[in-house]
Image (cartoon, rainbow, N blue to C red):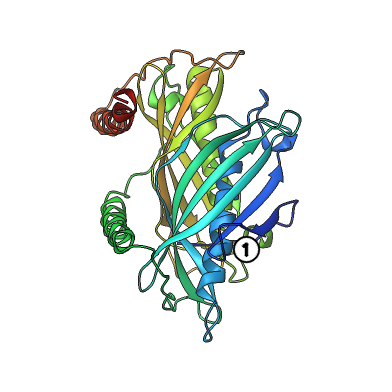
Amino acid sequence: MQLARALDSGGVAATMSPAGPGAIQISRIMRPDDANIAGNVHGGTILKMIEEAGAIISTRHCNSQSGERCVAALARVERTDFLSPMCIGEVAHVSAEITYTSKHSVEVQVNVVSENILTGVKKVTNKATLWYVPLALQNVHKVLEVPPIQYAEKEQEEEGRRRYEEQKLERLETKERNGDVILPIINPEPYTVGYSQSSLIHLVGPSDCTMHGFVHGGVTMKLMDEVAGIVAARHCKTNIVTASVDAINFHEKIKKGSVITISGRMTFTSNKSMEIEVFVDADPFVDESQERYRAVSAFFTYVSLSKEGKPLPVPQLVVEAEDERRRFEEGKGRYLQTKAKRQAKMQPLTQQ
């Protein structure tokens, strides 16, 4: 679980949305340092803005009644698809709305729209669902109760409860398979797992943290996307962009002063996409009594683009060891499942 930042002071404007008191919108123009060399905005930049919007609205809601003050901690980000690339000079409008509350958690739905301020053209680029847990301001280990929201229809509450139970079960399953580590490989062959795997080491400083002294969820996700991007670029040696992120699970908080290792490796390739497993391990040097632990895990999907922005074929991953074959088959299963869901959504449209 990561504590979420209320607002980035670097040029982000937050306003109440016309949709009502239960929704907000933040906007920011995309700068050169937000993008790769091809001018496409990093997926991590967008994820960071999504988390900021979710943090604002969930923290505000959890403090809407009298009682002990709290800050909302990010616990999970559901699958997020990058529907359209965003470029330097465009304005990102991120709107967030609370759609469900359980006794101790908040579900936030976030939509991202890019605006070309020269032409006025707007495009939906992202849709995401985030889950937050309120932690007491004076005692980070104390989880507070969440004020309930009013639902327009009973079905909305029932659907929210179903989503809550599903994500709770998936979080437990993910935590059980989090024992893997990435070890360096000497002189790996091209297109193998070892050839593109990458790691980044980061010292958690005050600017990375919330008022609790724990890392912002958005900071972590941005670093994860950077590592995943390096893995993808090493594998295909072209311009790459984030296509989607499978559920990001925040298992444990990361304290200021810790050293975190963000590791990524290729798990699966289709003809035009690459799945990359990324996880974050924390070494709490400020607390020598605690051992290294797995803090966050997720799967990122990237696509390769030509100079004209058209999808390119992806070199097929060469799997060698038995565990690599197992991860490849698991990734293939996730790919086929996602493809089937996408086709099921498109079918009613084609029948109209």
Closer to the camera, 109 or 181? Answer: 109
Picture coordinates of residue 334, whole percent (x, y): 29, 34
Q: Quadrant of the C terminus?
A: top left
Picture coordinates of residue 145, whole percent (x, y): 41, 78
Vertical position of residue 187 compared to residue 248: above or below: above
Helix, strand or loop at label 1? It is loop
Vertical position of residue 9 compared to residue 63: above or below: above
What's the amino acid at mark 1?
Ala
Q: Say which residue appears at 70% left-offset and 32% top-offset.
A: 120
Which residue position holds label 1?
A: 6
**Residue 259 shows in the view:** no
Q: Say which residue appears at 49% left-offset and 32% top-offset.
A: 83
**Residue 15 shows in the view:** yes
Crowding near the residue tagged with mark 1, few <14, some 14–19, many ≥20 C-alpha atoms within 10 Å: many
Picture coordinates of residue 31, whole percent (x, y): 74, 37
Q: Quadrant of residue 113?
A: top right
Closer to the camera, 148 or 87? Answer: 148
Q: Quadrant of the N terminus?
A: bottom left
